[in-house]
Amino acid sequence: MNWRDLQSKLAGTGYIAGPDLAMALALMARLERPFLIEGEAGVGKTDVAKALAEVLETDLIRLQCYEGLDANAAVYEWNYQRQLLAIKIWEDEDLSVDEKEEHIFQERFLLKRPLLDAITRERPPVLLIDEIDRADEEFEAYLLEVLSDFQVSIPEMGTVKAISIPYVVLTSNSTRELSDALRRRCLYHWLDYPDEEKELAIVHARVPEMADALAGQIVRFVQALRREDLEKKPGIAETLDWARALAGLGMARLDEDMDAITQTLLCLLKTRADREQIAPEVVDRLVARAV
Amino acid sequence: MSGAGRSAGPESGPAAGVTLFAGQSTAPPDRHVVRQILRFARHARDNGFPVGIDESLDALRFAESADLMDRGEIHGGLRALFCASAADWERFDDLFESYWTYRGQRTEVQVSGSVNRPGGEADAPFAQRLGIEGGNSGGGADETPGGASAAERLAGTDFRHLHESRDLQAVNELTERLARRMRWRLSRRRRVRARGRVIDLRNTIHKSLMHGGVPMKLAFKRRHPRPLKLVVILDASGSMSLYSGFFIRFIRGIVENFAESEAYVFHTRLVHLSAALREKDIERAVERMAMMSAGWGGGTRIGESLRSFNRYHAKSALNSRSVVMIVSDGYDTGPPEVLAAQLKKLRGRAKRVIWLNPLLGWRGYEPVAQGMAAALPYVDLFAPAHNLESLMALESYLYKL
């Protein structure tokens, strides 16, 4: 697929991707490399995968990483209850231990977790490995192996080869440095906060009922707010929440009701320190500039 | 994008991505384009981008399908392919621009040569305490006379009283070894103690087969070893200058040996040091660190430096297993409230906060400096760090955590 087609199809699902991102996604589909997206929280990293799955009309399989995530939770697990039952049922059968063992380590006793699931589908799914930086280094190394060979070895059964190669999207908030090997294996994209034009397009796409004038004011306000000295800058989701809140209040202009602004600012500022930082005077200044 | 190479046909199986041009029906791009792309790939590699053969080949596969007249598309595709980190991402535009516009202006950083060191010798009894077996890496020709007493003397000597180059050499090496030794003991402890009481179903079932499925022997999951994470924040101000050389070595030993450790240095502002410290050659590491801190003026601002640590680094550097080690004499020119507030914040995010103060080893020293007094309530351990003995005492503290 040409990147321009991809870009417009993504826009059709409500995801506004810049040309760079669309090119990289097109390239990923062609080269069968995993795609690593880094960026601040709230710039829409996870949504890339969701939108891509929608465009490709395929399933999204999500693996949320956390500290202590191990292969059992990510790749496969034996269904112990069924195994125990099976052993009981075969208790009186005249079978050797080896034969029994062979029986209980069959595919029907296997619980597929996201990684194994993703490589054993007929139609390649989008595999989202979210916040890979939260997982441990050992898991990262294991993941690298799976992503390079696209096969999983299960000691009791042998090697499971990929039926199809999934579109792999990894996201990272850089809470930990990722290994060079994994980085090299992946295509890379740094996703920044959207510029005014792009954010406006996003608001239009996601909150279509909003009037143009107010949408522009909201986006300019948020853009200016991000330049303030904040602990946690508002992401795209925050902009959209705020836009919906203001639309719900039936506002037409940002400067018509300062109280409403102050009260709904909770949508944008999520820590107490940030709320103290943005004093009413600052809000006045930002509103005046945005209108 | 439904993808020729992605189908599960027998020829283009899962390994298709490995083969060049696998599953492609189009002809490879013409030779001129191939040469240009490969040259640019080499140029990127020369400039420190992680571009290997795989990336070069993929760049060619990309060029087959890309619109070669569209500069934006070439730029976007190669950027995704050749970059591996945010730092690469930022540099790529310049590289691309300079290459295709000015044809390869090479930007290389010259690093000055390292200083040769004579092989210093550590003495046996002290060496044994540090867990060093037998001789050491240095040449045997340069034996330090004096045997045990010399080592004992060195261990107890305040770093600022060391002047002879031979003493310095020995202490430097011992410092590095001490750091290495600390990590060895720390990790060993976890191997012995870490044993969870969670039943491992997989192994239990495996073992139950021989008893006809009755789980006679339970298998337990061992807890995954979770090493401590050390974060060192070093004061490099003038008042600390007598000590910073030693701490750089000590910290380097730690950074080298603890997989998860980070080091920062501050004077008027905070600089992330880990990359400089991973430099193989210690002299060069010290040189780099001197370069980083060069030109800093004004008073030490501990509070401000901790603020910037909390804001920009704490999220990635700290977790519940982190031990923060601040090495400073506590002379802060900023307001003590800032220091106290920032330290409190830091304390909330880390497991322990240790403050090492070289002055504490001086006879009659009291932590009266305003900053130090403000900091004390938020510090778990306030310890001296003026000689090797005091650094070794630290080991037993970390051991008990």
Image (spheres, grey):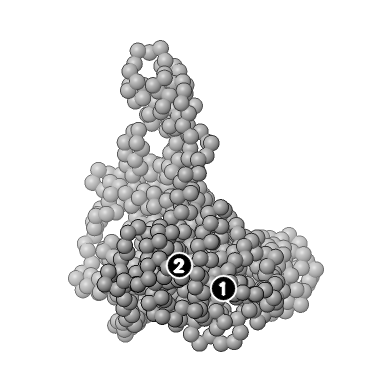
The answer for how far apart the CA atoms under marks 1 and 2 are is 19 Å
Q: Which residue is mark 2?
A: B152
Residue type, numbered disc 1: Pro
Q: Which residue is mark 1?
A: B358
Closer to us: B368 or B183: B368
Q: Position of residue B347 (x, y in %)?
A: 64, 62
Q: Residue at x 55, y 55 (%)?
A: B321
- Residue A52 vs residue A263: left or right? left
Mark 2, residues whose alpha carbon is within 10 Å: few (<14), some, or many (≥20)?
some
Q: Residue at x 47, y 74 (%)?
A: B246
Q: Position of residue B128 (x, y in %)?
A: 40, 59
Give the mark count: 2
- Report if residue A208 is visible in the image: no
The circle on residue B109 is none
Using the image, name the chain to which the residue with label 1 belongs. Answer: B
- Report if residue B130 is visible in the image: yes
Closer to us: B383 or B299: B383
- Residue A39 vs residue B66: left or right? right
Q: Position of residue A254 (x, y in %)?
A: 73, 72
Q: Residue at x 74, y 70 (%)?
A: A276
